[in-house]
Each structure stands twice: as structure tokens, then as C-alpha cells.
Amino acid sequence: MNSFGKEALEAHNKFRAAHQAPPLTWSSALAQDAEVWAKKIAKKGRLEHDDTKDGENIYMVCGREIDGTDAVNSWYSEVKDYNFGKPGFQSNTGHFTQVVWKSSEELGIGRAKSADGKEFVVGRYKPAGNMMRAFAENVLPSKDGPVKIPEKESASKQGSVPVYRRQKHEERPTQGVETRTEEKTIILPDGTKKTVLSTVTVTLKGNDQGGYSRETVTTISETRKQDNFAQDMKTALPQGSPRTQDPKDSKSSSSTGGPKAPCSVPQTGFAKQALDAHNKYRAKHRVSPLTWSDEIAKEAQAWAEKLARAGKLQHASQAERKGYGENIAMFSGRFETAADEATNMWYNEVKDYRFDKPGFQGNTGHFTQVVWKKSSELGMGRAQTADGKLTYVVARYNPAGNMLNHFQENVFKG
């Protein structure tokens, strides 16, 4: 066991001790499997779960060196969202529950770095945690409250930009729910063709004998997506419609989707201003910071220039923006502070958002995209009109936010 594995094991066992679970032992076999998978997803450049019977947590970070505690601290941090009063599967706490799962006995950790500098960490557990109907006896509260995570986990204070994902329970049938969405073309009664989203949700219900029953629900929805416009200068613009689930996003709750983008941490200028403005607000709403994508920024810049030439606000089509989320803004002057100005405008919609009734609201789409938990990458561009009077700003997000039926787990009160 190397020092990275030793640190990860010790971090696990510190948290497990606090939650009344016995310590894990190191498994070289699990570690070898974890490293093989870490190298595979590093080569792909994105988070993705393996088809394994073992328990699995995965983690990705961009822009800094890590040790064996970083991923474990990230996984454990979900403790704040776990409802000990109602034990059971919760989609946004699967990493935490696996870390402290009482019946898990062995751990293996693997790591790998992608060509563009992303660090990937894979944790494997045996026996697997997060089993249906077994949470009450396996996820116990800490007698002294949640363990305080070391200060270095705060990206804003360290200048780092970690990215981490929920555990992909839906790929593993023993863990409750499997959801798959794909785009299909159907033929209507009048003979015309229409593209829709077909979502199949399979729910597995366990029983006391260790078996389970399967319930399958198929839903068809239209592929409309929300357009977000920022309004300055009292320009009247449409508010659009709510998003349905994006096909590429739903296949894996741990995958960023879209093309691979460079891993970069801007130090100065417009990019840093844009990232800092977003992450200030995201930290306030208890979600992980965004990372900067040069590739997405290049596309956002091209669209901003197109808008400035046309002299009007208009969203790119879904094909043109490759399914990314998009916020756009226009205002007079303020070119040097454009990233701050636009982000502040978008965030200002928070005053109108109903946290007690989470969901799509026509006048708060910019705000919800800015703080959308599952979005992990940002690229922004800015451009001026020929006379220099107006500034256009375009922000793109990967994965896209504002997904229908996913507001409660992605938009939190600050």
C-alpha cells in the first residue's frame, strides 16, 4: 500500500469510527481493480462508473495536486444532506453512505491522471454498501455530530477547483433505481414524425428475504429546453420553457457529458473574473465550484461576437451549443467588468425563486443555472457592438442545468 492509499484508508476509518462502524482493511485486489478503472476513465477524460458488483465511489479534481484524503473528504461532505431520521437511499448522499457503511469490510483505492491534467480517484468496497432496506442498520449517526472536514477541502480558500459527482446508483440494480433516457423518433396518428425523450425508470423494492420486485415506468416527454435571457435596459424578451431531461446527461449521473475540455485554472483577466463570480455564489448555496473550460469558452466567445454583430439577444440552438446550458446578457458599456456584471444580473433573480416550492420558474432561470449543483464546467465570452456602446455576454455550462424534476437536488437555499 502506497502513501496515497494509506491516507485514504485512514481518512475512511476516521469517519467510520465517528459513525459507529468498524474500520476497513486494505485489499490489494480491490486497489488493483480500482486503478485499472481509474486509468480507463482518465483516458476518456470523464467520470463514469464501472459495471462491478463491488461498491464504488469516484472523484475528479482539476487544477491542483491531491493526497489520499481529498476524495474521501469530498465523499463524506454529503453527510450534511443525509436524513438520519428517515434512513434510506438518497440520491445526493450515496458517497457518504458508502464511506460509513457498517457492513463493508475491505477497501481499495486507485488513481490516475488524464492527458489534460485531471486527477481521477476510484474507491472500491467489499461488500458493497447502499443496499436496499439496509440503511438503518448500516448508516449510523455520529454521537458527536458530523466530523469537521479539514480546511483544505475549501476550494475557494485554496484556489483549487474540485469536481465531484454523485455515486451512480442507477447503474447498479441492487441499489434501488435505474433510469435511462434516450431520444426517439415516433410516428403520430397523422403520419408525421416527432422527436421525443423516452425515459424508463426501474425501481427495485427489496424484501426481508433478500430478494426484490421490479416496477417499470416509461414516460414520454417533449425535448423542449428553457432559454435563459438576462434583461437590462428594460428589453422585453421571452422567458422560454422548462427543460426536460437531456439524453446525454441522464445515462450517467456521474458523467459530465459532451466533448472533453481542457483542464485549466485561469489566474487573471476575464476568465478568472467569470469563474470567481460564479463560484462565490455557488459556495453561498453549498454546491461545488465550477472549473473553467477553454473549449467551451471559445464557443461562447464566438456566439457573443455574433450577437454583437447582429445587435440583438438570441440563444444558440441546441445543436449549435452542443446541449450545454446557456445564459446570455446585454448591457451598456461595462466591458472590463462584463463577467461580474452579467453574473450579478443572473444571480439577482434569487430574490424571486421559491425555495419552498422548487421547480422551474420562468423569471429565475439564470439564477438556477448559476448555482445548479450538477453543472461542473463553465466557459464565457464577451463582445462589444461596433460603436462600443453595448456589451454582450454569453455563458455556457456543462452539464446543462434547469432540468425538469431535478431542481430540489440541485438548487439549495443560501
Image (spheres, rainbow, N blue to C red):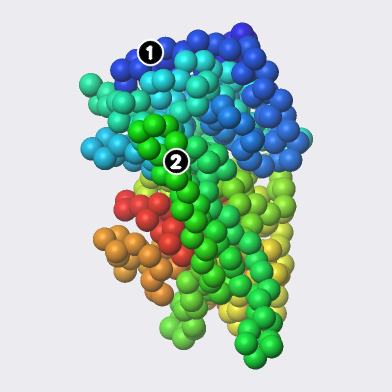
In front of the other: 206 or 125: 206
CB atoms at circles 1 and 2 under 8 Å apart? Answer: no
Residue 381: in sight, yes or no? Answer: no
Q: Residue furthest front?
A: 209
**Residue type highlighted by circle 2:** Tyr
**Residue type highlighted by circle 1:** Pro
Q: Residues within 10 Å of mark 1 (few under 14, many from 20)?
A: some
**In which quadrant is the N terminus drawn?**
top right
Picture residue at 35% right of the left edge, 17% below the top: 21
Picture residue at 23% right of the left edge, 21% below the top: 143
Residue 51: image location, x then y, percent: 64, 36
Mark 1 vs mark 2: in front: 2
Residue 212's tag is: 2
Residue 366's tag is: none
Of labels 1 and 2, earlier in sequence is 1
Picture residue at 37% right of the left edge, 49% below the top: 285
* Mark 1: secondary structure: loop
In front of the other: 397 or 179: 179
Q: Residues within 10 Å of mark 2 (few under 14, many from 20)?
A: some
Marks 1 and 2, Cα distance to the nearest angstrom? Answer: 28 Å
Quadrant of the rendered structure where residue 103 is? Answer: top left
Residue 147: image location, x then y, percent: 32, 24
The answer to whether residue 327 is above or below residue 175 is below
Quadrant of the rendered structure where residue 382 is? Answer: bottom right
Quadrant of the rendered structure where residue 3 is? Answer: top right
Q: Residue furthest bottom?
A: 190
Picture residue at 67% right of the left edge, 81% below the top: 187
The answer to whether residue 58 is above or below residue 11 is below
Residue 22's tag is: 1
* Mark 2: secondary structure: strand
